Amino acid sequence: VLLQAFGGGLVQTGSFLRLSCAASGKTLLGYNMGWFRQAPGKEREFVGVIMWSSGRTYYADSVKGRFTISRDNAETTVYLQMNSLKPADTAAYYCAAERVRGSLLLPTTVADYDYWGQGTQVTVSS
């Protein structure tokens, strides 16, 4: 699965952005879709995930209440709506796909995912 993430940019504190992640030539049926971010000098960290079967979403505490993950009805694109952005949100954002295997564990680590998109940079100025 070839994933492409886009929509990043430079915004001011308190602003919003919507990132998109599209699968090239394929639907996302059967994949849990996660978003991660990585700031310079830091580990890549979990932001949130939308589960394929239920559509339920889960978020890191640092973004809960501000970020929302959704997907389109055609199951080809996943979105990350980011509101009330803070300078601490500055990072390269990555989308990732985990092939559903029936695991009961929530996919929150880098190792859980099978496919990754390229990063899209989000910079929040103070």
Image (cartoon, rainbow, N blue to C red):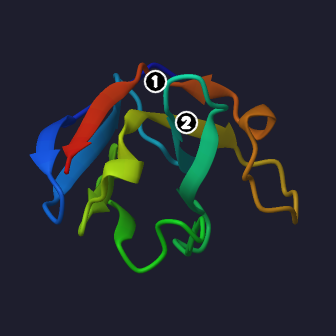
Viewer-proximal residue among 116 and 86:
86
Q: Residue at x 28, y 60 (%)?
A: 82
Please, is residue 24 above or below residue 108 in the view?
Answer: above
Q: Quadrant of residue 120?
A: top left
Please, is residue 118 above or below residue 26 in the view?
Answer: above
- Mark 1: give few (<14), some (14-19) or many (20+) Cα within 10 Å: many
Question: In what element is the residue under mark 2?
Answer: strand
Q: Is residue 79 left or right of residue 30?
A: left
Q: Quadrant of residue 60?
A: bottom right
Viewer-proximal residue among 35 and 77:
35
Say which amino acid is labelled 2: Ala
- Sequence-earlier tag: 2 or 1: 2
Q: Is residue 31 visible?
A: no
List x then y, in percent, for residue 41.
Answer: 59, 23
Q: Is residue 106 left or right of residue 61?
A: right
Residue receiving disc 2:
96
- What is the residue that sits farthest to the bottom in this orientation? 65
- Mark 2: give few (<14), some (14-19) or many (20+) Cα within 10 Å: many
Q: Residue at x 59, y 74 (%)?
A: 54
Question: In what element is the residue under mark 1?
Answer: loop
Q: Is residue 78 visible?
A: yes
List x then y, in percent, for residue 87.
Answer: 32, 50
User: What is the distance, in whole Å, between disc 2 and disc 1 at their CAs?
Assistant: 6 Å
Q: Quadrant of residue 48?
A: bottom right
Say which amino acid is labelled 1: Gly
Q: How many marks?
A: 2
Q: Is residue 80 left or right of residue 61?
A: left
Viewer-proximal residue among 30 and 79:
79
Q: Residue at x 48, y 75 (%)?
A: 64
Contact (CB < 8 A) between labels 2 and 1? yes
Residue receiving disc 1:
117
